[in-house]
Amino acid sequence: MCGIVGFTGPQSAAPILLQGLKALEYRGYDSAGVAVMDGGSIRLEKVSGRIANLCEKTRDGQAVPGCTGIGHTRWATHGAPTDINAHPHLSNDGRFAVVHNGIIENFASLRDELTQKGYSFVSETDTEVVVHLIEMYYRGNLKTAVMKTVSRLEGSYALGIVCTDYPDTLFAVRQASPLILGIGAGENFFASDVTALVAHTKNCIYLDDGELAELSPESVKVYDCAGQEIKKSVNRITWDLEAAEKGGYEHFMLKEIMEQPAAVKSALTPRIKNGEIVLDDFDPDGSLLRGVSRIVITACGSAYYAGCAGRYAIERLSRIPVTTVLASELRYDDPIIDDGTLLIVLSQSGETADTIAAMKECKRRGASTLAIVNVVGSTIAKMADHTLYTYAGPEIAVATTKGYTTQLAVLFLFALYAARKLGRIEDAQYRALLRQLKELPKKIQQAIDMAHSTEKLAQKVHKAPSLFFIGRNTDYAVALEGALKMKEISYVHAESYAAGELKHGTIALIVEGQPVIAVCCNEKLSEKTMSNIIEVKARGAKVLSVAVQGNRQIFSVADDVVCIPPTEQLFTPLLAVIPMQLLAYYTAKANGRDIDKPRNLAKSVTVE
Ligand code: G6P
C-alpha cells in the first residue's frame, strides 16, 4: 500500500527511483510517478496503472534528467487511480513536489482554508493540501516550512519532499507511516521499506514518529519534532537482494511456500537452547507471565487466523484464558483490558494501521504487549514492550504464506514456554512437545511433497462458483485461512464453517457437485468431522479432505485426500495449511490470476 522512494547522489535519479518503486510493487498500488530536480525546475512524470507504463513513458528513466528525486506508488484512497491523482503532487508555484503515504484526516478543512487563500487544487487527493501548505509557509527555509506544515496535519503520513531552492536535497518526515533512510557512500536514499534499499546499501536509519530528515549526497541529518538535530543509530539490514527476488520460481508466492521449512527453522532454532526455550529477552524468570490473568491476541487478515490457530496451543498448555479479536474491531470496542492482560500482536509487516491502533488502545488501558513481527524495525516492533521476530525473510507475494507459518511457530514456542514457566506441564511432556516442535521444519517439507496432487485437484474446483471449507477446533482455524487464501488469489468465493455448524444453516447450500474442502487433522474430532463429510456427501457434495497420514477411514469417506505427516495435534495447523496454500495457488493459476498482486489488495495496509 503506497510506496515511497527518494534518491540523491551523483547518478541519474529516475532509473534508481523506478528500480526502487519496482521493489515496492508488492505492497499494492494502482498508479505511479516520479519527480526529479532538473536544473532549476522539477520534472514530473506520472501514470495510472503499472510501473511498466511509467518505465515505457520515461524510457526506463533515461528521459528524465537530474540526480535528486522522489517516487511513489499510489494505492487509491481519496480519488480514483488516475494520472492526475497519482503522486508526486506539485505546488502552484512549481517549486515543491511531495509524495505521501498515509491519510491526512483533516484534509477537507485544510483544503477549504487553502482554497480561500487562493491556492488551486488539481487532484482529488488528501495529499495535495500538504504541498500547498509547504508553499504557504515557505519563507526561504524548507525545514521550517515542513515543520509548520506537519503541525497542521492530523492522521498518518510519511512524506518525501523536494524543492527547487535545494537542488540536491531530500526532506522526509514520518508520523505513523513507515519510512526508512538508506545510507550510501556519496549517495543517500529513503524508502517505505528495506526491499527498495538493499540493492544499494545495507545501512539504514529507522525514522521514528515526528522526526524529520534532511538528506544530501554527502550528509544525513535527523531532527526531532522541535527541530533539534538528534543522533540516530545506523542499523544493518540482514536481508540480501537475492532473498527479495524470485529465484527461478514462477511466482513469489510459490517461492515463499517452498521457503517455509527454512523460514520456520529460522524462527524456532535460535530460541531452543540446551533443551530449553529462550524467547529472546521476553520474561526470562516468568514473573510477567505469573501476573497475567488473560491473553488477548489481535491482528488482521491471515495474521489473525494464525492467532486463531495458535490460541488452542496457548490455552491448552498454559491454562491462561486466551481470546482472539480482530484488530479492526478491537480498536473501536470498549475492551476489558487491564494490567493483568498480555496482548499478543501478530503482524508480518509490523505496519498494519488497524493493528497499531488496537495496540495503542490496549497499551493505554495497561496491557503488556508482546509483538510477533517479521519486519525488523517496523512500527509495531518498536511500539511493543517485547518483540519476537519471525525471521521469515522478505515476503513479497501479497498473500502471506511463510509469514503465517512462522507466526504460528513462534506462538507454539510461546505456548510451551508459558506452560513451562508457570509449572503447568510435566517435564516429560515438555520434552516430547519440544521434540515435535523441532521436527516441524522437516515435516513441512514432507507436507509440501505430499501435496503434489493439489495441482491436479485445483482443476476440479477452479470453475466452481463457491467453495466450502470445514473443520473443527484447530482444523476450523485452518479452514478459515484456507478459505481466505482461496478468495484472495483465485477470486473463487469461499466460506469457512465450523463443521458442527453446517446443520444450523449452511447445509441448505449443499447441492449436487458442490466442492467441500474438509480439514480433518484433529484426531480427537476426526470421527465427528467424518460424520459431517458423510452428511454433505449424502447431499451430493464432492469432498477433498486434508487428513493425517495413517487415517485409513478417510479414504472411504472423502472423494480425494491429501495427507500431512503426523505431529502433536496442537501443531497440526502448521502442516495442514500447506495443502491449503498450494490448492489456492494452483486454483489461482488455473484461473489465470495475477497471483503475487491480486486485484484491490495490498501487502502492507498502512491506512484504515
Ligand atoms: C493484508 C495482507 C494479508 C495480511 C494482513 C495483515 O491484508 O494482504 O496477507 O495477513 O494484511 O498484515 P500484517 O502485515 O499485519 O500481518
Image (cartoon, rainbow, N blue to C red):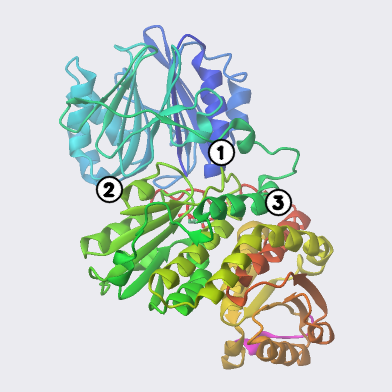
Query: Is 499 left or right of 35, judged from the image as shown?
Result: right
* Residue 105: mark in rendering: 2
How far from the left and from the top, in percent, is residue 260? 65, 53
The answer to whether the beta carbon of the residue marked 1 is less than 8 Å from any atom of ligand 1 is: no
Query: Circle 1 sits in a helix, a strand or a loop, which is it?
Result: helix
Give the secondary structure at mark 3.
helix
Relative to 472, is 377 on the left or the right?
left
Which mark's residue is nearer the viewer, 1 or 2? 1
Q: Helix, strand or loop at disc 2?
A: loop
- Locate residue 540, reporting x and y percent: 78, 87
* Label 1 packing within 10 angstroms: few (<14), some (14-19), many (20+): many
Determine whether label 2 and label 3 are within 8 Å by CB: no
Q: Tell me the magenta residue range.
A: 506-513
Give the Cα separation between the discs numbered 2 and 3. Answer: 41 Å
Give the residue pinned by disc 1. Answer: 25
Residue type indicated by callout 3: Met
Image coordinates of residue 553 in percent, x first then y, are: 80, 87
Dot 3 and dot 1 residues touching (CB under 8 Å): no
Which residue is depicted at the point 19% across and 14% down?
140
Disc on res. 258: 3
Name the quadrant containing residue 225. top left
Three-letter code, disc 1: Glu
Percent of width and height locating residue 55 = 60, 25
- Asked if residue 245 is positioned above or below residue 392 in the image, the reply reads above
- Residue at coordinates 57% horizontally, 66% vertically from top-left? 434
Q: Which residue is drawn at 60% across and 59% down?
A: 488
Image side of residue 278 versus residue 296, left or right = right
